[in-house]
Image: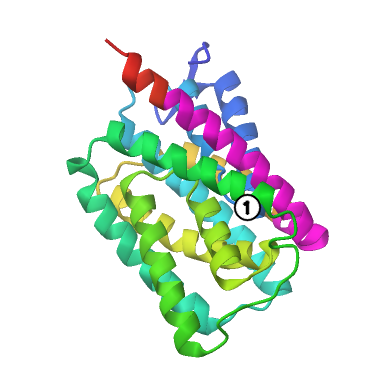
Amino acid sequence: MLDGPLLADWLPVSAAALIFILVAAGVAGWVDAVVGGGGLIQLPALVIAVPQDVSTPYILGTNKLSSFFGTLSASWVYLRSIRVQMNLLVPLVLGAFGGSAVGAALSRYVPREVLTPVVLVAVIAVAAYTLLKPKMGLHHEPRHLGNLAVGWRSLVIGIGVGFYDGILGPGTGSFFVILLVAVLGFGFLQASVNAKIANLTTNLAALAVYGVHGEILLLLGAAMAIANMIGGFIGAKMATRGGSAFVRIVFLVVLSLLIVKLAWDTVVQFTAP
């Protein structure tokens, strides 16, 4: 935690901590807008800066509030610049929502120490696959153009990644992107647009749960949401101008951060007394 007097009972952080959190939220919004993975920055910042007597659901709920509005901002910019295919987007979103709900319901029954190493291996495989195919995703060349072919593949991707988001979560946006690129032949930029909207759906589902239980620090979450939206707006603008090559670079950087985090979590799990 960043030390200092708390600003108020309804804003339980010091001024230094607030600045730290808002900067992290802005950077997370930028990363999330380009390729997903902003949670790797924003959530740890909240854990560090918020007093330890604030329970975990409040931290998670506040994080989701900020992420939702940041993703909403980025989605708005993307949708004004890039056309989406409704025959892909609708089943992707429906699958993501259903998968996330099931994953969240089952998350309490599946030990995290089992999931983390498995996801680590999957992320390393995704990074290696992307590096070994330098031209993959640089051009938007959709495959499976028929409505049925696109629809069922999108539905399966939505269910699978949504389930992962509900049961564990880190790197959800990146998994959406790479599957849309590898399975459907999308460019990284076009995949990011659809991933952003699908991720918006999973964020909304989680936010509704936390909101019903009142587990959100509203003032802090609102301040973070503004910072996240600004970062998201800038990131989406840069992505649409930089194209798929720019998004691919950021994608690999985010995957590297995710590998480091998951590797650390795995080591801690198996070395803890």
Residue under label 1, please give it. 35
Asked if residue 5 is among those painted magenta in the image, a careful observer would answer no
Q: Is residue 162 left or right of residue 189?
A: left
Residue 152 image position (x, y, % from top left)? 41, 79
Residue 247, image quadrant:
bottom right
Residue 160 image position (x, y, % from top left)? 37, 60
The magenta segment? 236-265
Q: Quadrant of the C terminus?
A: top left
Residue 129: tell me if it is visible: yes
Residue 257, image quadrant:
top right
Which residue is painted at 69% across and 66% down in the image?
187
Q: Is residue 247 left or right of residue 267?
A: right
- Packing grade of label 1 (10 A; few <14, some 14-19, many >=20) is many
For this rendering, which residue is in front, 173 or 44?
173
Q: Is residue 170 left or right of residue 211?
A: right
Residue 231: tell me if it is visible: no
